[in-house]
Amino acid sequence: MYQGKLVFAQMMQHLPLTTFRRCVTRYRGERKVKSFSCLDQFLSMAFAQLTFRESLRDIEACLRAHHAKLYHLGIRSAVARNTLANANAVRDWRIYADFAQSLIGIARPLYVDEPFGVDLQDTVYALDATTIDLCLSVFPWAPFQSTKAAVKLHTLLDLRGNIPTFIHISDGKLHEVSILDQLVPEPGAFYIMDRGFLDFARLYRFHQAGSFFVTRAKSNTKAKRRYSRPVDRSTGLVCDQTIFLTGIYSPQDYQAPLRRIRFKDPKTSKTLVFLTNNFVLPAFTTTELYRCRWQVELFFKWIKQHLRIKAFFGTSENAVKSQIWIAVSVYVLVAIVRKRLKLPGSLYQILQILSLTLFEKTPMDQLLSHAVADQIDAGSVKQLSLFN
């Protein structure tokens, strides 16, 4: 019988603990801390994410039931809900934000060759935001509407592997387009976004940096056609034009030509108008790129269903942000383990198996490979085929 490490400890072996300690030191996370360290807090919250715990009392009860195994999990102190609640409320959430970014830096090279639906060698990002509704009386620091609170997750998703490369957590009132000011454009990369991000002054900054964008035009966008290219109408393309913006402010905000592609979806008969600053890609490939933007919507749906980011263990801003960033860290960690161990199956299947086996001592590669090979109800995750 294998007498090695618990499955949870095997998972946590893939964490760069030296980087974690640097993040803790950077923000003085363990100032005046006697026993319950930041690593204990992170591991406890990661356990809650992997086992789908519902509350701090739930976390405390489960970990106390395995008190003799806490040391082998990597947790060096007893876990009490008051101690964990205080740690979430007080310890700087930026510790876990920086650590999540370091995990993202590890995960992205592992998925650099992953296909995403379009035969393109360049890096492609999808940009969007999702709202998590909250109670205004409990979360007054996150105003959204007169009777409702909310937090927004502004996310830049790398479509190769569906790894979030940038996440900004704000209250519900911050408009999505403002996030463009916080992004550092990557030369040669494609940024796919919906028309809520259509701000020509901000997009011109991306153009000057050598980045490409694909977005949709609004109904009131004024422009003058300068040149038309031939298109294959059997694919749904209506026109492919070079345009210059007209109007009062748009020509001053964006002083370069744009490419306008009109496309009629053969399935829905809906006409879409795309704007891009890339004049090299075939017109139909550009429409396919925008179709891939839907992956960020599926990403939001997936994390809301399978991570604990809709019900929070604390009510303060620091506690909410800490929980979200630890959830992102767990998501990226599972993606790293899946690639390093060359596991078959989807992230959904891996998470479901881990939720029941964290206290076993079976080697993780054997455990997950054999379980996935048994064809675990593949039909139940049909809607999540994006993460296969």
Image (cartoon, grey):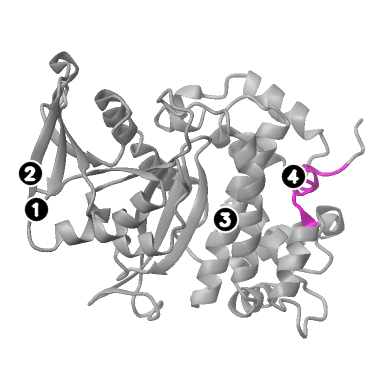
Three-letter amino acid code at the position of disc 1: Thr
Q: Give the label, 1 or 4, closer to the camera.
A: 1
Distance, label 1 to label 4, CA atoms, is: 56 Å
- Mark 1: few, some, or many residues within 10 Å (few <14, many ≥20)? some
Label 4 crowding class (10 Å Cα cut-off): few <14, some 14-19, many 20+? some
| Chain part drawn in magenta | 5-17
Q: Position of residue 300 (x, y in %)?
A: 41, 48
Q: Residues within 10 Å of mark 3 (few under 14, many from 20)?
A: many
Position of 6 relative to 94 (above/below): above
Quadrant of the rendered image containing residue 135: bottom left
Sequence-first disc among 4 and 2 = 4
- Quadrant of the image containing the N terminus: top right
Q: What residue is pinned by disc 1?
A: 246
Q: How many marks?
A: 4
Determine the image quadrant of residue 65.
bottom right
Residue 327, numbered circle: 3
Instruction: Specify which label sits upstream in the sequence, 3 or 1.
Output: 1
Q: Is residue 363 above or below residue 79?
A: above
Label 2 secondary element: strand
| Cα–Cα gap, marks 3 and 2 | 47 Å
| Mark 4 vs mark 2: in front | 2
Mark 2 is surrounded, within 10 Å at the Cα level, by few (under 14), some (14 to 19) or many (20 or more) other residues, namely: few
Mark 1 or mark 2, which has the lower sequence index? 2
* Residue hosting label 2: 224
Tell me the kind of residue under disc 3: Ala
Residue 97, image x, y percentages: 59, 63
- Whether the magenta-drawn stretch holds residue 107 is answered as no
Mark 3 or 1, closer to the camera: 1
Mark 3 residue element: helix
Q: Are marks 4 and 3 in contact (CB under 8 Å)?
A: no
Residue 129 in view: yes
Query: Tags 3 and 1 in contact by the CB under 8 Å rule?
Result: no
